[in-house]
Amino acid sequence: MMWNNLAKLIRAATVLVLAFFQTAASAQDPNPMLAENAEERLSEHIYMIRGFPNVLIIVGTKATLVVDTGLGPTNGEIVARTAARLGGSSKLWLTTTHFHPEHAAGEGGFPNGTVLIRAKVQQEELEQDNDATITRFRMRREQDAALLKGVTYRKPDIVFESSYNMDLGGVHAKLLWAGRAHTKGDVEIFIEEDKALISGDVIQNRYGPVFATSGSGTPREWLRTLDVLSQLSPRLIIPDHSAPGNAHLIIEAQEFLKFLDSRAHKLKSMGIDKAEAAKTINGELRAKYPDWELHDVSNAVGLIYTE
Ligand SMILES: [Zn+2]
């Protein structure tokens, strides 16, 4: 009897401790649920659901294009309902800026007949990842695990090499694979009539580049991708984890990456070990960009040290 009570007490304590850690975790991570009926109109043809991530809906007279899905099918359904409300029953296209789960794992929430289109490099990267990223997300917190329950990826209807042009009716979208940056397969979407670039994780606003444990390019590769994108001369840049901004965001991203690249090469040539170099550069970036949301650049420094 006493052991029984003790076991109950231990179980209760465990639940409390777990609850504490889950609250602590969710305080840092953004809310993964997208809001319904909360889209903002950014330009003549572009609407945005601001959230994790920002989801874009481009509405033409013949078709609607959705960029990114939200985390899991429940969010995908919210996005699909919003797209149907804005675009009516016209043809629905869906593309993803990269394969990470908050961008791609909500595809199952879209209706039958949705045309899924993706760059070949991105599709290969998704398949090679073999659900490793989704498994990591499931372990982050219970809410993410619930949203990602049973998620599988279907094959895209269309796969393109480096670009794909779309006529949505009165508005044209160019889907681009411009090279490696945040992932191997980042896709950016240029909306010609609105001179707007949907830049995914490749160009952000006061938000440092995220170099993933695997898949991200070196700062120099990322800069080459930015060179291609700057030739589009966008007036509006729409990132997926920060606020929209103007063309200056490209210049800021270039300056950031050049600084990171030159400092890491310099410290490497001085024989400083890579952990120490990363620590130094992280500190310098914090001083240089006090009002930015920054991410640890250790992975970028690691790439430069093995170049
Ligand atoms: Zn990502």
Image (spheres, rainbow, N blue to C red):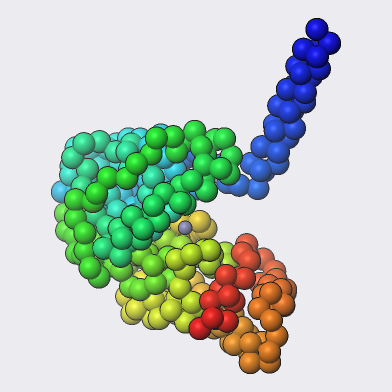
Q: What residue sits 19% from the left and 55% below the top? A: 158
96 vs 26: above or below:
below
Q: What residue sits 36% from the left and 58% below the top? A: 128
Residue 217 position in % (x across, y down): 45, 73
Q: What residue sits 42% from the left and 44% below the top? A: 70
Among all residues in the image, which is located at the extreme top?
A: 1
Residue 19 position in % (x across, y down): 69, 31
Residue 110 position in % (x across, y down): 29, 38
143 vs 234: above or below:
above
In this picture, residue 296 sits left or right of residue 198? right
Q: Is residue 45 visible?
A: no
In this picture, residue 242 sits left or right of residue 70? right
Q: How many marks?
A: 0
Q: Nearer the viewer, residue 129 or 249?
A: 129
205 vs 285: above or below:
above
Q: Is residue 282 visible?
A: yes
Among all residues in the image, which is located at the extreme right?
A: 2
Among all residues in the image, which is located at the extreme bottom?
A: 269
Residue 79 position in % (x across, y down): 36, 40
Q: What residue sits 39% from the left and 67% below the top? A: 184
19 vs 57: above or below:
above
The quarter of the picture where residue 77 lies is: top left
In this picture, residue 7 sits left or right of residue 135? right
Q: Nearer the viewer, residue 176 or 132?
A: 132
Q: Nearer the viewer, residue 36 or 160?
A: 160
Q: Nearer the viewer, residue 103 or 305?
A: 305
